[in-house]
Image: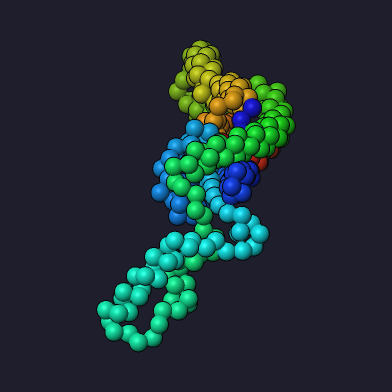
Amino acid sequence: MPKSMTGFAFTEQNLPDGTLIAVTLKSLNHRYLDISLNAPKEVSNMEIQIAGIVKRFLSRGRVTLTVTIKNPDQINGGFYFDEKTALSTLENLEKLRNTLNIIDPVRIEHILSFSLMQQNENPVVEKSLWNILEKTIEKALIELVERRTEEGSRLAETILLILDQVEIALGEIEKIAPFVTEERKAKLLSILSDSMDSFLSARKEILDQDRAWLKTFIEARILTEISFLADKITIQEEIDRLKIHLRNFRETLLKNTPVGKTLDFIIQEINRETNTIASKAQKAEISIQAVKIKENLENIREQVQNLE
């Protein structure tokens, strides 16, 4: 079964020191794979590596990946205080004050203004963070793929039900098609026969015995031409191609690979054949069924837009 492009997943990992790493994934429809990363600065430089992980699991969709890292103090609603960095900054500020001959002393708000006592920061070392983060992202992606697969199965079931209605309408067209051809042939024969009779009646110089022979000859020629035209106006060829497209659509829909773009192309072909049938047949009963096919195709197209 195909996969949907919409889904949501969330997973988190607690480290031995109490630090919490959480990964949230949201996926929406998109023509290609578009990855957006929301993460703290500790992992922002890992965007290429993270995108590589996502590409191993997904091929289409607008994916938003959010990474949240909290130390124990942050989890409890407090602040993370980097004492070593704060003292170093205080020393540098004191040097700057002396250099510039500033009388006022360095205060705590000066240190805070440099964002050295930071909220929502994490002291995890980058190398060790990556190993844990990679596993957490993979776990979230596995969950996302499961959600997308479940949704894809539901979409496929809905599409197949609509496709049944398309095939029912096509079956009605196929029942009517032979009568359409015969009606068109009879109509052409009547028009041409009347024209022939009018032509011969107007030609007084033609002898009666020649008139009979000429009428027989023209009638035979008319029947030949009508048979040739009937081959041009028959819609059986379009019906046969439409059946092939519908069968191909079903087979493609049941594959476990990304099929969204392929199905969209098949829908275009089905729509084109349906338009040709309606145009060539020029019969109300067939036009009604063609409209039903196109309405159902539009419903199918809306569902296919959600498939990977």
Query: Residue 174, percent across and down?
Result: 67, 23
Which quadrant holds the N terminus? top right
* Residue nearest the observer in this picture, 89 or 51: 89
Which quadrant holds the C terminus? top right
Query: Residue 14, percent across and down?
Result: 62, 45
Left or right: residue 6 compared with residue 213: right
* Residue nearest the observer in this picture, 77 or 145: 77
* Residue nearest the observer in this picture, 9 or 17: 17
Which residue is at a point 70% across and 25% down the rendered structure image?
A: 171
Which residue is at a point 44% across and 61% down the rendered structure image?
A: 84
- How many numbered callouts? 0
In the rendered view, tell whether residue 159 sits above or below residue 106: above
In the rendered view, tell whether residue 69 sits above or below residue 175: below
In the rendered view, tell whether residue 226 sits above or below residue 109: above
Which residue is at a point 53% across and 40% down the rendered structure image?
A: 132
* Residue nearest the observer in this picture, 34 or 306: 34
Q: What is the basis of the colouring in this image? A: rainbow
In the rendered view, tell whether residue 25 sits above or below residue 230: below
Query: Residue 237, percent across and down?
Result: 55, 21
Which residue is at a point 47% across and 72% down the rendered structure image?
A: 112
Query: Residue 3, percent across and down?
Result: 61, 33
Judge whether residue 256 can be spotted in this image. Answer: yes
Residue 277 position by quadrant: top right
Left or right: residue 206 compared with residue 138: left
Judge whether residue 287 can be spotted in this image. Answer: no
Farthest-out residue, left: 99
Residue 182 position by quadrant: top right
